[in-house]
Image: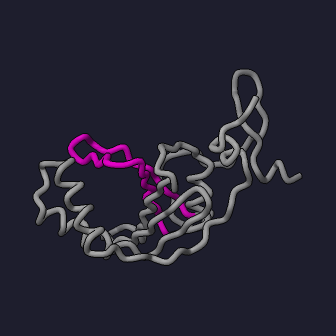
Amino acid sequence: MKRSKLQQREQGRWQPLYRATITQKTPEQKEALVQGIVSNFPEYTEAQTRDIIEKSHNEIREVWKNDQYTVMVIKWPPMEGWPPIVQLSIRRNDRAPMRDWRHFQRIKNEIVGPECEAVELYPAESRLVDTANQYHLWCIADPDFRIPLGYHTRTVGSRSFGNAQQRPHEEAADD
């Protein structure tokens, strides 16, 4: 059976992320973006849209890429009582939908650190932003901080058993 290019890529080896150069949009590209947003989201005026685009482009501090993903890094100003927060805005290079938990974990590890924790927020409908196949991890940039949710010990499997299905970990495949 012939596999698609997507299936081949997804089953291929992980390519490490590298720091990419941030390219500035031309005035024509910015204007096309403004017009596209205003025509698709009538609740935004042109002035509001221009302001949002300008602010968001100024907040992006780093861009990381590999053969599958582009990740924009936004470092949030400190909030009282919280360690530093880093937002990872992740998209596939082909802009298709994605959902590979291991890839998100690997992206978080490579950019923020393997001992830093992150969450993906499913917000109240009143705060929902869903305009593209783009995903966001909110990372605590302190390797000693633990979010008071989740498991307390590590348990990683590479084999399927019973009704549980698991693909081998890349690290296990190297053995």
> Which range of residues does the magenta coloring cover?
116-142
Q: Residue at x 45, y 66 (%)?
A: 72
**Depth order, front residue of 33/118:** 33
Tell me: residue 18, above or below residue 70: below
What count of labels does the image hold? 0
Tell me: residue 167, above or below residue 170: above
Residue with the most extreme right position: 175
Coloring scheme used: one colour
Residue 96 is at least partly visible in this image: yes
Position of 140 with respect to 165 (left or right) is left
Q: Residue at x 55, y 58 (%)?
A: 69
Tell me: residue 30, above or below residue 138: below
Residue 92 point in image, percent of width and height? 51, 53
Residue with the most extreme top position: 163
Position of 130 with respect to 145 (left or right) is left
Q: Is residue 137 magenta?
A: yes
Q: For the N terminus, which image quadrant?
A: top right
Q: Residue at x 27, y 46 (%)?
A: 128
Residue 33 point in image, percent of width and height? 26, 61
Residue 70 point in image, percent of width and height? 51, 62
**Depth order, front residue of 28/153:** 28
Residue 112 is at least partly visible in this image: no
Tell me: residue 153, above or below residue 49: above
Residue 133 point in image, percent of width and height? 41, 47
Position of 101 with respect to 62 (left or right) is right
Q: Residue at x 43, y 51 (%)?
A: 135
Q: Is residue 20 magenta?
A: no
